[in-house]
């Protein structure tokens, strides 16, 4: 197989696509120190963000930079929010900064990052995502009844798929009571169990406005829902925890409605097109089968069936002839071999071999008897010598020459330091034991 070589441009485009498609790089929260910063009035800002171990290039477009409420400076510690992508011309990755603030004032961002890490470890972001039904009958919408979100969703669904039923669950989407209201409506939808899809949404705003969709109880309610959930919270650049836990994230309410329902006219056209293609395919198959039938019908197999076996009959005759010849050849070879063996048997008689074998057997028996007798004598001498050596090493033999040993309470006494006057001791001789009492102890150095 010939190897295909990529161009540098193709490889770079592929890597950029990988960066842009990675959901974990769409919204990144970084903290670090500003480096290589030089203010460019009324223009995009280019700088680096670094810490003790690494550095990353950063770009902040003019529109985002003009919203800052402070002046960035070289060496300043900051909190960044942005996305990671690849700069194709240079082949290097960098962060596109969407928001920046001095370090120490981002309590909500810190809380958001910690909750993301916690839920990420539990697998709420990477869990199996439910597939949206292609043709939903009933769609539940969790949002404010007075906002532009519900109007956009209604307009889009009526335009694309008017046969679907939309059911609005009026919900607080901002404030301290919003998170509880969102959870209650999600649970109501689950208890009803009659909806094919659920859309949760609200318009854009600051992180404080969107905070109800970053709360843990909302994330867990979305994760535990059996109904497929589409989340459309904030603008395209706003990514909440609800977006990450939901089965599908939509950039806008209109996009959420487009994801929830197909275009009815397009589906009808697609069905018609498939019906036409199916009919054409059936007619084509019918034509092919008919042509094949006609070819088979006109084949010589049906008109002159004897011709079908002519080649096989000739092949069988040739194989039969070769088999007969092979059998005759093998028979003659075996016959010659048998005659040669019969002649060898007639020339040799086994009587001489039997007598020679009997003599050899007698000789081997006599040799075995002599070797066994010699082996037993050698072993007897070794045994006698070992007994004499053990007798010389016997303690009784030594005590027989006048030696003895002393015990106290069945313990052998090795030194006079172990004895005291008036103690009872036993002196062991070869022919008995003497019980005695110590009258005096004289150490060796006092003699």
Image (cartoon, rainbow, N blue to C red):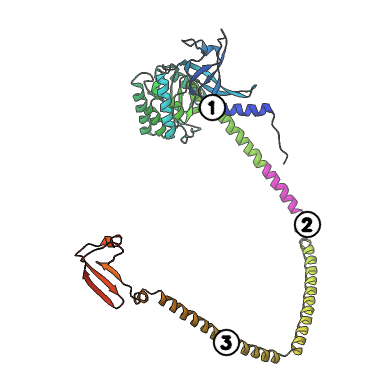
| Camera sees residue 169 | yes
Give the residue at x 41% y 74%: 393
Q: Which numbered disc, 3 or 2, marks the residue that appears first in the sequence?
A: 2
- Packing grade of label 2 (10 A; few <14, some 14-19, many >=20) is few
Q: Is 425 positioned to the left or the right of 228 in the image?
A: left
What percent of the width, then of the height, locates residue 270? Answer: 59, 32
- Look at mark 3 in the image and give the residue it sits on: 370
Give the residue at x 54% y 86%: 373
| Camera sees residue 261 | no
Q: Nearer the viewer, residue 372 or 265?
A: 372
Q: Is residue 444 above or below residue 77?
A: below
Mark 2 and mark 3 in contact (Cβ < 8 Å)? no
- Look at mark 1 in the image and give the residue it sits on: 263
What percent of the width, then of the height, locates residue 310? Answer: 79, 64
Q: Residues in magenta?
A: 284-298
- Residue 446, by quadrant, is bottom left
Nearest to the eye among marks 1 and 3: give it.
3
- Look at mark 2 in the image and give the residue it sits on: 300
- Residue 143, by quadrant, is top left
Mark 2 and mark 1 in contact (Cβ < 8 Å)? no
Nearest to the eye among marks 1 and 2: give it.
1
Marks 1/2: CA–CA distance: 57 Å
Q: Is residue 123 above or below residue 51?
A: below
Give the residue at x 22% y 64%: 440
Residue 201, magenta (yes or no): no
Q: Nearer the viewer, residue 178 or 317?
A: 178
């Amino acid at each position: 197989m010939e190897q295909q070589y990529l161009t540098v441009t193709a490889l770079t485009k592929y890597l950029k696509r990988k960066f842009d498609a990675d959901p974990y790089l769409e919204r990144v929260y970084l903290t670090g120190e500003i480096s290589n910063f030089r203010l460019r009035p009324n223009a995009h800002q280019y700088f680096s963000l670094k810490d003790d171990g690494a550095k990353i290039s950063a770009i902040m477009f003019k529109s985002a930079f003009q919203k800052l409420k402070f002046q960035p400076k070289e060496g300043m510690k900051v909190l960044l929010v942005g996305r990671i992508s690849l700069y194709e011309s240079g082949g290097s990755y960098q962060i596109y900064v969407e928001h920046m603030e001095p370090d120490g004032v981002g309590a909500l961002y810190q809380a958001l990052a910690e909750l993301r890490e916690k839920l990420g470890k539990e697998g709420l972001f990477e869990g199996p995502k439910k597939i949206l039904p292609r043709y939903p009958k009933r769609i539940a919408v969790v949002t404010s009844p007075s906002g532009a979100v519900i109007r956009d969703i209604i307009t889009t669904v009526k335009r694309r798929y008017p046969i679907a039923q939309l059911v609005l669950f009026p919900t607080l989407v901002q404030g301290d009571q919003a998170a509880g209201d969102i959870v209650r409506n999600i649970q109501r939808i689950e208890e009803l169990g009659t909806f094919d899809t659920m859309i949760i949404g609200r318009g854009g705003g600051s992180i404080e406005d969107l905070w109800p969709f970053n709360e843990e109880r909302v994330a867990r309610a979305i994760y535990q829902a059996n109904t497929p959930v589409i989340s459309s919270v904030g603008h395209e650049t706003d990514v909440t925890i609800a977006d990450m836990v939901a089965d599908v994230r939509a950039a806008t309410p209109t996009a959420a409605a487009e994801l929830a329902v197909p275009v009815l006219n397009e589906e009808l056209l697609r069905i018609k097109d498939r019906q036409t293609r199916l009919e054409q395919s059936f007619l084509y198959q019918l034509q092919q089968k008919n042509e094949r039938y006609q070819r088979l019908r006109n084949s010589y197999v049906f008109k002159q069936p004897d011709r079908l076996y002519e080649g096989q009959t000739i092949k069988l005759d040739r194989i039969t002839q070769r088999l007969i010849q092979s059998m005759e050849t093998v028979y003659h070879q075996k016959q010659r071999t048998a005659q040669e063996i019969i002649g060898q048997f007639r020339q040799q008689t086994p009587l001489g071999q039997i007598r020679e074998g009997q003599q050899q057997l007698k000789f081997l028996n006599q040799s075995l008897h002599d070797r066994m007798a010699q082996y037993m004598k050698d072993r007897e001498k070794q045994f006698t010598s070992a007994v004499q050596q053990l007798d010389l090493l016997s303690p009784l033999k030594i005590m027989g020459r006048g030696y003895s040993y002393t015990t106290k309470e069945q313990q052998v006494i090795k030194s006079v330091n172990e004895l005291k006057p008036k103690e009872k001791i036993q002196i062991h001789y070869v022919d008995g034991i003497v019980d005695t009492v110590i009258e005096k102890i004289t150490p060796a150095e006092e003699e």
